[in-house]
Image: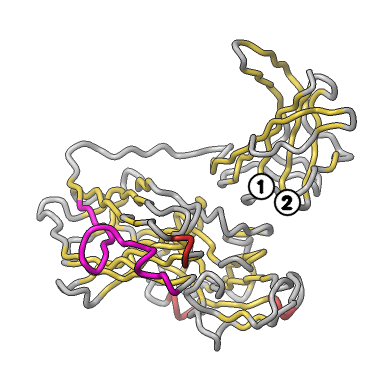
């Protein structure tokens, strides 16, 4: 008695979350949250308590709720990834109280999640960032006069002749507090010429990527790798901090289908993105648009199609809503991705399974909030700048 437990689903944090709480005093209750504050009791209670109990210091609750409730305050549950939140705290005289640090979250697919595993006998190619004199990057020394900067390094790589297709890869994040995003380019020359972006990790994203069993990405043509790491909130706070982040590629034989990473977005420059200070999300001035016109997919044969397997939307700190729309023959289909409560700290890939045909188009809309700023926010690579990007894995390449 006197305590509560809670679970919720959202796009990342508390804002826009659909939350269920349980306490002995109140039973199971359906709430929603429109901000970072105590959740509001929902007028429409859609969850049913099936049972529960406590044993060995563990409390468990069983409940059921429709996947779709037709309640504007609830979140649908379907074949897509959500952020599952949990918290626990005191249940006082006036109801549940602030949980403090007793909370956490995890990215899950509650309806369906494919399970892929790396096979045996794969080769490993490790690509790690390093400082100007070798070893780890000393962030305090590299950026002692800067609050936000980046490191670019070039590494020669040798992909084994009998294992030239990526089946999966790991992102090794070391200086997590400071690493904003971290890109891997694979290059055809030994000195990082002719580079193509292979993957871009951003804060809160996946770190162990395993491709579906019939898909692999060819990399045998590459002889070097360029790593670009962007850091934020440095200066004196980074004193004594080093970084040895990197990627590990797991390669093997070619599989039935070749895949690749692609993307849609604006070049992050002041000419493409400019949001005036004091602009609230939802206004016309808060929105920027990026298009993949029909000729962007003209390489797809007229009698074939590609499938977008996973996708990730990306903005920086001011991003509040991002939607990727699919256009075919001039008509808007259902959105490919929609993050109405975008959170910079949760930038994960979502399953898409959307087919793109010859002549299709995409429109990406990013909405920002600069009400706390005193100067115009422009497009750029730094954390205080902004971006508007959709990245995706597709097949066949």
- Labelled pair 1, 2 in contact (Cβ < 8 Å): yes
For the point 76% across and 44% down, which residue is it? Answer: 74
Q: Secondary structure at mark 2?
A: loop
Residue 244 placement (x, y as % from top left): 31, 55
Q: Crowdedness of circle 1 by 10 Å Cα count: few (<14), some, many (20+)?
A: many
Depth check: give the residue in front, 333 or 79: 79
Q: Is residue 320 above or below residue 168?
A: below
Question: Relative to 273, is 138 on the left or the right?
Answer: left
Rendered location of residue 51, percent (x, y): 72, 16
Query: Circle 2 sits on which residue?
Result: 16
The magenta stretch is: 125-145
| In the image, residue 132 lies in the stretch drawn in magenta | yes
**Residue highlighted by disc 1:** 10
User: What scheme was used to colour the molecule?
Assistant: secondary structure
Q: Position of residue 349 (x, y in %)?
A: 49, 53
Residue that appears at 63% across and 59% down: 342
Identify the disc placed on residue 26.
Answer: none
Q: Looking at the rendering, in which quadrant would you find the N terminus?
A: top right
- Indicate left or right for 194 with 391 as reference: left
Quarter of the figure that contains the C terminus? bottom left
Percent coordinates x, y for residue 227 in the rendering: 30, 66
Foreground pick, 206 / 372: 372
Q: Give SS at disc 1.
A: strand
* Residue name at image x 67 percent, y 13 percent: 54
Q: Is residue 18 above or below residue 162?
A: above
């Amino acid at each position: 008695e006197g305590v509560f437990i809670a679970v919720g689903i959202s796009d990342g944090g508390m804002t826009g979350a659909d939350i269920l709480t349980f306490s002995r005093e109140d039973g199971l209750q359906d709430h929603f949250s429109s901000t970072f504050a105590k959740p509001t009791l929902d007028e429409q209670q859609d969850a049913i308590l099936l049972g529960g109990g406590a044993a060995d210091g563990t409390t468990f609750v069983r409940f059921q709720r429709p996947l779709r409730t037709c309640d504007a305050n609830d979140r649908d549950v379907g074949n897509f990834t959500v952020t599952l939140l949990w918290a626990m705290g005191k249940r006082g005289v006036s109801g549940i109280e602030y949980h403090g640090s007793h909370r956490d979250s995890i990215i899950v697919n509650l309806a369906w999640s494919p399970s892929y595993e790396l096979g045996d006998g794969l080769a490993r190619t490790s690509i790690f960032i390093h400082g100007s004199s070798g070893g780890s990057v000393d962030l305090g020394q590299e950026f002692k006069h800067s609050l936000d900067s980046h490191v670019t390094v070039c590494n020669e790589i040798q992909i084994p002749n009998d294992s030239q297709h990526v089946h999966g890869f790991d992102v090794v994040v070391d200086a997590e507090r400071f690493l904003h995003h971290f890109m891997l380019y694979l290059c055809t020359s030994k000195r990082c010429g002719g580079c193509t972006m292979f993957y871009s990790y951003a804060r809160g994203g996946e770190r162990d990527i395993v491709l579906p069993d019939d898909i692999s990405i060819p990399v045998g043509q590459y002889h070097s790798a360029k790593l670009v790491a962007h850091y934020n909130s440095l200066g004196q706070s980074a004193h004594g901090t080093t970084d040895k982040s990197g990627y590990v590629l797991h390669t093997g034989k070619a599989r039935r289908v070749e895949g690749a990473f692609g993307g849609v977005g604006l070049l992050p420059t002041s000419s493409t993105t400019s949001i005036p200070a004091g602009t609230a999300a939802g206004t016309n001035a808060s929105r920027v648009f990026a298009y993949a016109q029909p000729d962007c997919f003209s390489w797809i044969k007229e009698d074939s199609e590609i499938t977008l397997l996973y996708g990730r939307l990306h903005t920086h700190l001011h991003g509040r809503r991002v939607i990727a729309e699919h256009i075919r023959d001039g008509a808007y289909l259902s959105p490919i991705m929609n993050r109405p409560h975008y959170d910079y700290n949760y930038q994960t890939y979502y399953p898409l399974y959307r087919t793109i045909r010859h002549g299709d188009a995409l429109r990406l809309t990013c909405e920002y909030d600069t009400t706390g700023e005193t100067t115009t926010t422009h497009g750029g690579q730094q954390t205080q700048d902004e971006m508007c990007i959709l990245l995706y894995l597709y097949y066949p390449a």
